[in-house]
Amino acid sequence: MKLICSLFITFLKIGVFTFGGGYAMIALLENEFVEKKKWLEKSEFLDMVAVAESTPGPVAINSATYIGYKIAGFAGAAMSTLAVCIPSFFVIYGISLFFDQFLSLRWVSCAFRGIQVCVIYLILTAGLKMLKSIDKNTLNLTLLTLVMASMLCCSITAVSFSSVFYILICGAVGLVVFFLRKIRKGHGKTS
Amino acid sequence: MIYLRLFLNFLMIGALSFGGGYGMVSLVRETVLSNGWLTENEFLNFIAVSESTPGPLAVNMATFIGSTQGGILGSFAATLGVVLPSFLIILLIASALKNLIKYAPVNAFLSGVRPCVVAMILATALSMALSTLFGLTDLQAGFAPDLRSIAVFAMLGATHLICKKIRKTAPSPILMILFSAGLGILFWCIF
């Protein structure tokens, strides 16, 4: 019980102090659980990061659930996840109540015209940063170009085609390529 | 039934958004635009708010959109939806399928998804830039460049490059948001 309380408070603290999303939080988590509390080994922590990054959903939630489960089972996972969501939930809910009134101030609405441009810049730089970090092999570049071209065409011609399909199709292409390679390898061995 | 729609839409986003906060921007954008929950400008405003408040982007967006559409129950339904898939998948991995992300087919699926997510982020940024900077939402509607937005974008880009040259790191998102707010007041209220 004490363990779960301590998990809850730690994740509440992490939920309050992480600005800028999941990745900023990983350093904080490591400091808290590996160095200070020594609840996790360094290698366990790295496993956790790999899992959190390659499963769907926000990295923050994924790591809270994983660490909570490792330390205190199902109850630990539930409490950690709840704790990491609570601060955002109340802060944003509060903002949502006053945001329209806030925006109706003239200076604020001017400032937000500039901020809207900044957000596009932020998304673009995040995308470019990810582009730098992926392997530049033929498969990746082909998928990337096709998805981008098709998304831009759909957006310009106002055709609606959900991104969900792109994700599923690209995942399926990854699987097909994998099995084709396997088959080819199998043939190489038998002949 | 708005609560159910919020829950199901965010459940899908939670289950299919790979690659952390910005990875989900394109899915959320499509969802809110096609349901008429927010306009493009409101969506951009809100990403700026998420960036400058603590907590995971996904939870922030779900809470805000839920609250504007269905009050506190709406934000609860949307947040629950976005968190639930992560929670269940991670529980499964942490308890039973320890090596799930090490299985070759899972990796093959993810290797297809990775370039797709990068393409989605870049395409979303570009189509946002086309509509906000150049007034080009679709081909029929035509072309209406907004010089002030373009000027702000160019100044942000220049600041980014100068910062990278001098300090070797990109400027922090919050600083850029503040800077763009200043530019917004200067360009839209004063000139």
Image: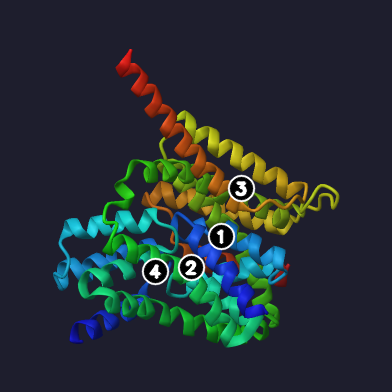
Q: Position of residue B19 (x, y in %)?
A: 44, 54
How far apart in space, not on screen, are marks 3 and 4 (Cα)?
Answer: 29 Å
**Residue A28 location in percent, x, y?**
28, 68
Q: Are marks 1 and 2 on the same chain?
A: yes
Which of the two discs, 4 and 1, labels the residue nearer the N terminus? Answer: 1
Mark 4 lies on a secondary structure that is helix
Query: Cα distance, mark 4 to mark 2?
Result: 16 Å
Q: Are marks 3 and 1 in contact (CB under 8 Å)?
A: no
Which residue position holds label 4?
B87
- Name the N-terminal-most of marks 1 and 2: 1
Q: Residue at x 41, y 36 (%)?
A: A135
Contact between labelled residues 4 and 3, with CB atoms less than 8 Å apart? no
Can residue B40 be seen here? The reply is no
Q: Which mark is residue B57?
A: 2
Whether label 1 touches label 2, CB < 8 Å = yes
Residue type at mark 4 is: Phe
Specify the amino acid type for callout 2: Leu
Is residue B91 positioned above or below B133 on the image?
Answer: below
Q: Secondary structure at mark 2?
A: helix
**A82 and A148: which is toward the camera:** A82
Which of the two marks, 4 or 2, is nearer to us in this view?
A: 4
